[in-house]
Image: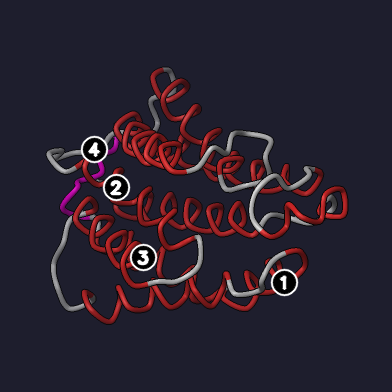
């Protein structure tokens, strides 16, 4: 089975950064339909600060997640800074001592991030938030990865599940944030957080595929 070394995580983080930067305008458009319209700008700001600050440094996957999360938590406005900051910092802590990160390990890291999110937000699957993207990916990695042994195939499926989670929010009614005030009028539009989470997870999976040894 292919191996993903924690120490090989820098390119993965930079791929995540590039994906957010490339989708800044798109995320703003999605958020603008039922939200404040600043999601792309805020996410791009945080991820770009991380790149500027650490692109010339060496760091592991877990270290990069922790540094990125700290920036988002402490330096970025809006609701998504603390939310993504918590997810990344808690995921980093779960993987900090790992040398190799298996698909199941990745699931445990993302689960730690999800549990951390649950500590600060009451959202659950079906509430039209990034949980609709992240939770199914966590469930898959912790379940099917124990059966499927080919890491690239697991990552391919991870990307598919993230996209399905994102798309599921289009037919949901928002329960949190500004969009919740729209009630049924929020139906028919993707959730911005679920969309950015999909972008991040798809880039993460692609980066890990490229880093497999």
Structural crowding at the residue carrying mark 1, measured as other residues with C-alpha within 10 Å and reported as few (<14), some (14–19) or many (≥20): some
Q: Which disc number belongs to residue 94?
A: 4
Horizontal and vertical percent position of residue 176? 65, 49
Q: Which residue is mark 1?
A: 32
Magenta stretch in the rendered image: 1-8
Q: Which disc number belongs to residue 72?
A: 3
Q: CA distance from mark 2 to mark 3?
A: 27 Å
**Mark 1 vs mark 4: which is more N-terminal?**
1
In the displayed structure, 178 sits above or below 173; it is below
Q: CA distance from mark 3 to mark 1?
A: 21 Å
**Mark 2 vs mark 3: which is more N-terminal?**
3
Which quarter of the rendered picture does the N terminus lie within?
Answer: top left
Left or right relative to 180: residue 94:
left
Q: Residue furthest front?
A: 181
Q: Residue furthest bottom?
A: 52
Q: Quadrant of residue 64?
A: bottom left
Q: Which disc number belongs to residue 121?
A: none
């Amino acid at each position: 089975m292919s191996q993903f070394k924690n120490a090989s995580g820098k390119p993965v983080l930079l791929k995540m950064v590039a994906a957010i930067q490339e989708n800044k305008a798109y995320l703003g458009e999605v958020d603008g339909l039922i939200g404040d319209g600043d999601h792309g700008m805020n996410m791009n700001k945080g991820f770009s600060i991380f790149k500027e600050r650490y692109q010339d440094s060496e760091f592991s996957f877990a270290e990069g997640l922790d540094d990125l999360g700290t920036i988002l938590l402490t330096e970025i406005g809006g609701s998504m800074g603390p939310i993504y900051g918590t997810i990344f910092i808690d995921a980093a802590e779960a993987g900090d001592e790992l040398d190799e990160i298996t698909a199941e390990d990745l699931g445990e890291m993302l689960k730690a991030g999800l549990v951390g999110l649950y500590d600060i937000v009451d959202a659950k699957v079906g509430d039209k938030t990034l949980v609709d993207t992240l939770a199914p990916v966590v469930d898959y990695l912790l379940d099917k990865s124990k059966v499927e042994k080919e890491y690239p195939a697991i990552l391919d499926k991870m990307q598919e599940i993230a996209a399905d989670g994102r798309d599921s929010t289009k037919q949901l009614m928002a329960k949190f944030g500004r969009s919740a005030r729209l009630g049924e009028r929020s139906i028919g539009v993707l959730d911005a957080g679920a969309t950015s989470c999909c972008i991040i997870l798809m880039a993460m999976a692609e980066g890990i595929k490229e880093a497999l040894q």
